[in-house]
Amino acid sequence: MADAQTQPITINPESIRQAVDARMNARLKMWMGICAHCGLCADTCHFFTAKNGDPRMVPSFKAQKLKKLFKKKGNVDEAFMQELYDTAYGECTLCRRCTLYCPFGIDMAMMVATMRGILTSQGLTPEGLKAAIQNYLETGNQMAVSEEDWVETLKWMEEELQEELPGATIPIDKKGANIMYTVNAREPKYYPQDIQLAAKIFHVVGEDWTFPSKPGWDDTNLAMFAGDIKSASYIVKLIKDAAEELQVKRVAITE
Amino acid sequence: MTFTAFVEGPLVWIAFLTFLVGSAVRLLLFITLSRKKDKPVYRYFSLKWMLLSIVRWLFPTNPDLQKNPVFSILGYIFHICLLAVPLFYSAHITLWQESRFKWSWWAMPDNWADWMTLIVLAIAIFFIIRRIVVPSVRIITTPSDFLLIVICALPFLTGYLNTHPDGTAYQWTTSILPFYGQYSTIIHIITGALMLIVVPFTKLAHWILFFVSRSVIGIEFGRRNYSV
């Protein structure tokens, strides 16, 4: 069981049908059609193994729920959507190990990720993910660190660093730098020392690097885990825009 | 036109054309839709990863051999016999020779065809039992999975019966189905035609889509440095 599905489920058949159709591509259709139900994927799944061979954890069984949803053309009930939610979030980590053993190479993780996207389109997203996505859209990072707090944290870390390594800096908005460095937003929020450690290495090797002050420094993308492609690409675009504005040569993604 | 003439003539044409055109349509449907909705496949297109992935899984050079050796090896043997007997059985080639195409190619010795037919039937029974007995396979099994095994096995069953009219199996069959002796060849052709006709409409389309599916995942995994 996935946690935190506390929202009441309201069924809007037309909206579900549209969400399914919009996401149905040629690969998904092919995979739904050719899965031979051979069962070779069963014991490749860690959920299957951890639950002592519970047949409901067979990857093909989970992935084929997308086929059921596709065939129902939006005519589903609350129980079916709840089952889909539990499978998509509670019974698959999208690790793709099953695909490594599927003779056809069926990407069952992509099928489950598509389920997540459809669920998200109906407002069915785990609360934590939903809040994080809202943070990205409002502040550009998942922890809702304000631009002021971000810059202040960097300056504070720079001061501490200079006590140990005189001359070391944490450059902000340095145009034309070699590397634009990005972090997980948990770092400025809870573990700012991590930023200091990275700066120490950059200083010692003499790297030409910088942080953007504006959004684009958080390289996590939790919207991706909710199958929220629109928000996910917005988050990536923040990084791309920051890199282009600073005219850096490359972006270091640490997450 | 008599029913017999219909089965021996038009039905065979219908079966082969449905099989070939239907499979081609499945392929075209993939290509046209993927051009619009599966852009990564084309953006990262790589012949190298495509071919590597296909070859690795067409031949017994993939990890399933180690993980599930019995099922994998039986799967390979089943597919080889399923393709080889219809294509290389001497009496089938004689029919091609006598047809308007006058085609001819290598024929396998008839006792090979006998054994390979029995192997197909034995493995088909094994597949059916496995689908019933193994819980992790039973849960993903649909009625059509059973039906398709039967549809694939029937041409082999009737082929074996018809080439061994003195055998006990044949005697037994004609005692239950008295008309069988009269229509044995027609029934064999119908079962073969049925198998060809269902291919484009079922999971059996994997005879061609296998290559497409392996290609797209080969491209996807190859560029990420995963095992293809």
Image (cartoon, coloured by chain):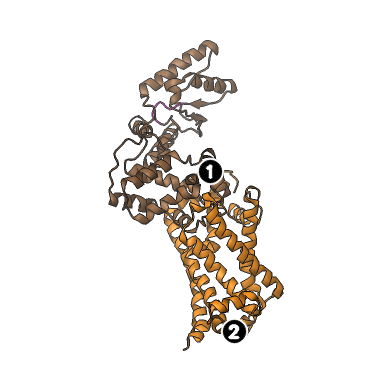
Residue A45 in the image: state x and y as whole percent: 53, 43
Q: Nearer the viewer, residue A86 or B167?
A: B167
Which residue is disc 1 drawn over?
A: A53
- Which residue extends farthest top? A163
Main SS category, magenta section: loop
Marks 2, 1 in one chain:
no
Q: Which residues are magenta?
A: A211-215
Q: Colour of chain A?
A: brown
Q: What separation in Å lies between label 2 and label 1 (alpha carbons)?
A: 54 Å
Q: Nearer the viewer, residue B101 or B155?
A: B155
Residue B74 in the image: state x and y as whole percent: 64, 58
Quadrant containing the N terminus of chain A in the rendered view: top left
Q: Secondary structure at mark 1?
A: loop
Labels 2 and 1 touching (C-beta < 8 A): no
- Label at residue A203: none
- Label at residue B99: 2
Mark nearest the camera among 2 and 1 is 1
The type of residue carrying mark 1 is: Gly
In this rendering, the count of numbered labels is: 2
The type of residue carrying mark 2 is: Ser
Q: Is residue A37 visible?
A: yes
Assess whether residue B38 is covered by the magenta stretch: no
Chain that is orange in the image: B
Residue A182 in the image: state x and y as whole percent: 47, 29
Quadrant for residue A205, please give it.
top right
